[in-house]
Image (spheres, grey):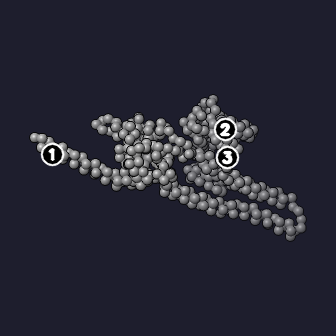
Amino acid sequence: MNSSANISESELKNEVEKLHSLNQLILDSVAEGIYGIDLEANVIFWNKAAEELTGFSMSDFQENNLHNLIHHTNQQGEHVPLTDCPVYHALISGESLFVEDDIFWKKDGTSFPVEYTIKPMQEQGKHVGTVITFRDMSEKIKTEEMLAEWEKLLVVGQMSAGIAHEIRNPITSLKGFVQLMKESKQLNEEYFDIMDSEFNRIETIIKELLMFSKPQKTSFKQHDIKDLVSQVVLLMEPQAVMKNIRLVTNWQSCESVYISCLDHQIKQVFINLIKNAMEAIESDGEIVLTITTGQKEVTITVKDDGPGISPDHVEKLGQPFYSTKESGTGLGMMVTTNIIKNNHRGSLEVESEVGKGTVFEVRLPLVGGKGS
């Protein structure tokens, strides 16, 4: 009887070891790093990919806490206490979590960008730990940066062609009038007016192109977006009154809403958007500016009741030298897009329907989130 029990126990032990080996084999065949921790934050499994990505092995966690080895410092170089770690919070709460932009540290002291998924481990209906799957995002980031550079080069190429075309036309006119005056040896007032207009066009193009340059980060300061938009409305009010257009502001809260920005550039954005709306309406209409505050960003909308823009024209807005206005350069919208997206890490979206007006929606990150 005892012999039979011993054999069964031995067989059971062998079966458990086989299952453990099979599970480890499966884990080691996966390209992503995978590890599991129990409720005491002890590492209970650690696959081969995790070891290759970080340089740490299971033996390293016998005397050291996992967090203190691979997740001790954030991207800004600040120490991350265990209690602030997303993995720790997911472990305590038993919730799933996806973290898109973080870093892990290697045994050699270097770091690498990661995204990771945290899932709870269940055993007989009880929460017993957490499984973390992480990926090295270095190659993906390099690829995205390379694509961004190609896109910049493409834009530069498009702009170069556009600039050459836009400036060549007034220069050709100027050369023609200079040649006429040289041959006739007479000064014609009408020629001077046309030449002055052509010089003004060249100056406008150059001025808008200069605004396209990226500012230094040190120039950024905290400003209340409501104050900035209010200043723009006050500035544009006389022009609106002359065209019988009402400028309406709709703040959903009286609290200050702070963003980190270059105030003159943000003002320029809303000057451009209000000016475009006024030109679209021409006369007798309404432009409504609304500010809505979220947890991490503020949304500012500029809505007009003008004639609207067709879908094919909406898609082309922001392209250099494309404009819905007969005399427009298209650079104003391109500059606006650059200020919001590239200089201030925000977003700009356009919704329009012919006959019903247009809505420009600007989203900008708040300073430290809501309530900061």
Towards the viewer: 240 or 159:
159
Picture residue at 58% right of the left edge, 41% below the top:
365
Q: Estimate the spatial distance between the alpha carbons at disc 2 and disc 3, rounded to whole Å.
A: 14 Å
How many C-alpha atoms fall within 10 Å of the one at disc 1: few (<14), some, or many (≥20)?
few
Picture residue at 62% right of the left edge, 35% below the top:
257
How many numbered discs?
A: 3
Question: Which of pointers 2 and 3 indicates the residue nearer the eye?
Answer: 3
Residue 85, can we see it? yes
Mark 3 sits on what residue?
218
Mark 2 sits on what residue?
223
In the image, residue 38 lies at what x, y percent?
36, 39
Quadrant containing the C terminus is top right
Towards the viewer: 176 or 13:
13
Mark 1 sits on what residue?
7
Tag 3 or tag 2, which sits nearer the N-term? 3
Picture residue at 48% right of the left edge, 49% below the top:
105
Q: Is residue 100 left or right of residue 356?
A: left
Amino acid beneath label 1: Ile
Quadrant containing the N terminus is top left
Discs 3, 1 touching: Cβ within 8 Å: no
